[in-house]
Image (tube, rainbow, N blue to C red):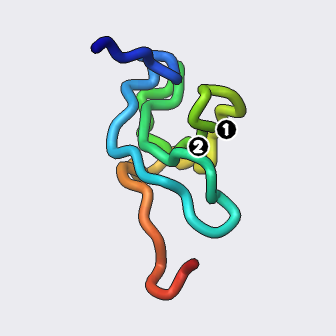
Amino acid sequence: MSTTPIVPRSLRPAGPAWGRGSMAGFIVFSGYRPGSGHSEIFRVAPDGSGLVLLTFNEVNFDYAAGWLPGTP
Protein backbone atom coordinates (compact mmCIF):
# COMPACT_ATOMS: atom_id res chain seq x y z
CA MET A 1 0.00 0.00 0.00
CA SER A 2 1.38 3.42 -0.88
CA THR A 3 0.77 6.75 0.78
CA THR A 4 0.02 10.04 -0.90
CA PRO A 5 1.10 13.27 0.80
CA ILE A 6 -1.72 15.79 1.24
CA VAL A 7 0.60 18.74 1.97
CA PRO A 8 3.89 19.76 0.36
CA ARG A 9 6.87 17.86 1.76
CA SER A 10 8.73 21.18 1.90
CA LEU A 11 6.60 22.05 4.97
CA ARG A 12 8.19 19.07 6.78
CA PRO A 13 4.85 18.14 8.39
CA ALA A 14 4.92 16.43 11.79
CA GLY A 15 2.67 15.62 14.73
CA PRO A 16 -0.71 15.41 12.99
CA ALA A 17 -3.85 15.46 15.14
CA TRP A 18 -7.56 15.54 14.38
CA GLY A 19 -8.98 18.99 15.04
CA ARG A 20 -11.55 19.71 17.74
CA GLY A 21 -14.25 22.32 18.10
CA SER A 22 -14.05 24.77 15.20
CA MET A 23 -11.23 22.66 13.70
CA ALA A 24 -13.32 19.45 13.66
CA GLY A 25 -12.96 17.65 10.34
CA PHE A 26 -9.46 19.06 9.76
CA ILE A 27 -6.00 17.70 10.41
CA VAL A 28 -3.84 20.05 12.48
CA PHE A 29 -0.05 19.62 12.29
CA SER A 30 3.25 21.38 12.80
CA GLY A 31 5.46 22.29 9.88
CA TYR A 32 7.97 24.86 8.72
CA ARG A 33 6.72 28.08 7.17
CA PRO A 34 8.20 28.37 3.66
CA GLY A 35 11.14 30.73 3.43
CA SER A 36 11.38 31.39 7.17
CA GLY A 37 12.71 28.34 8.98
CA HIS A 38 10.13 28.86 11.72
CA SER A 39 7.98 25.97 12.92
CA GLU A 40 4.27 26.81 12.83
CA ILE A 41 0.87 25.15 13.20
CA PHE A 42 -1.20 24.46 10.06
CA ARG A 43 -4.57 22.92 9.30
CA VAL A 44 -5.70 21.03 6.21
CA ALA A 45 -8.74 19.05 5.13
CA PRO A 46 -8.23 15.27 4.85
CA ASP A 47 -8.34 15.56 1.05
CA GLY A 48 -5.48 18.11 1.06
CA SER A 49 -7.65 21.15 0.37
CA GLY A 50 -7.86 24.28 2.48
CA LEU A 51 -4.28 24.43 3.78
CA VAL A 52 -4.15 27.31 6.31
CA LEU A 53 -1.33 28.70 8.45
CA LEU A 54 -2.77 29.07 11.99
CA THR A 55 0.23 30.63 13.77
CA PHE A 56 2.83 33.18 12.74
CA ASN A 57 5.55 33.25 15.34
CA GLU A 58 8.89 34.93 14.59
CA VAL A 59 10.32 34.37 18.09
CA ASN A 60 9.52 30.85 19.28
CA PHE A 61 8.78 27.59 17.56
CA ASP A 62 5.24 26.23 17.47
CA TYR A 63 5.88 22.52 17.35
CA ALA A 64 2.73 20.71 18.49
CA ALA A 65 -0.97 21.23 18.18
CA GLY A 66 -2.61 20.97 21.60
CA TRP A 67 -5.99 21.51 23.16
CA LEU A 68 -6.88 23.13 26.45
CA PRO A 69 -8.55 20.87 29.01
CA GLY A 70 -12.30 20.85 28.51
CA THR A 71 -12.11 21.98 24.88
CA PRO A 72 -14.70 20.05 22.86
Q: Position of residue 30 (x, y in %)?
A: 42, 42
Q: Looking at the image, do the residues carrying marks 2 and 1 touch, with CB atoms under 8 Å apart?
A: yes
Instruction: Decide if residue 70 is on the left or right side of residue 43.
Output: left
Depth check: 56 or 3 in front? Answer: 3
Reply above or below: 27 against 33. below
* Residue found at x 61% / y 28%: 47
Mark number for residue 52? 1
Mark toward the start of the polypeptide (2 vs 1): 2
Indicate the quadrant where residue 45 lies. top right
Please tell me whether mark 2 sits on a helix, a strand or a loop.
Answer: strand
Reply above or below: 39 against 13. below
Please tell me whether mark 1 sits on a helix, a strand or a loop.
Answer: strand
Q: Position of residue 12 (x, y in %)?
A: 37, 25
Q: Position of residue 17 (x, y in %)?
A: 42, 52
Instruction: Decide if residue 42 is on the left or right side of residue 64.
Output: right
- Crowd class of label 1 (few under 14; some 14 to 19; many from 20; radius 10 Å): few
- Calculate the distance from the C-alpha at mark 2 to the C-alpha at mark 1: 5 Å
According to the image, label 2 marks what residue?
Answer: 43
Quadrant of the image for the C terminus? bottom right
In the image, farthest residue toward the bottom: 70
Question: Looking at the picture, which amino acid does disc 2 mark?
Answer: Arg
* Residue found at x 36% / y 49%: 63
* Residue found at x 28% / y 14%: 1
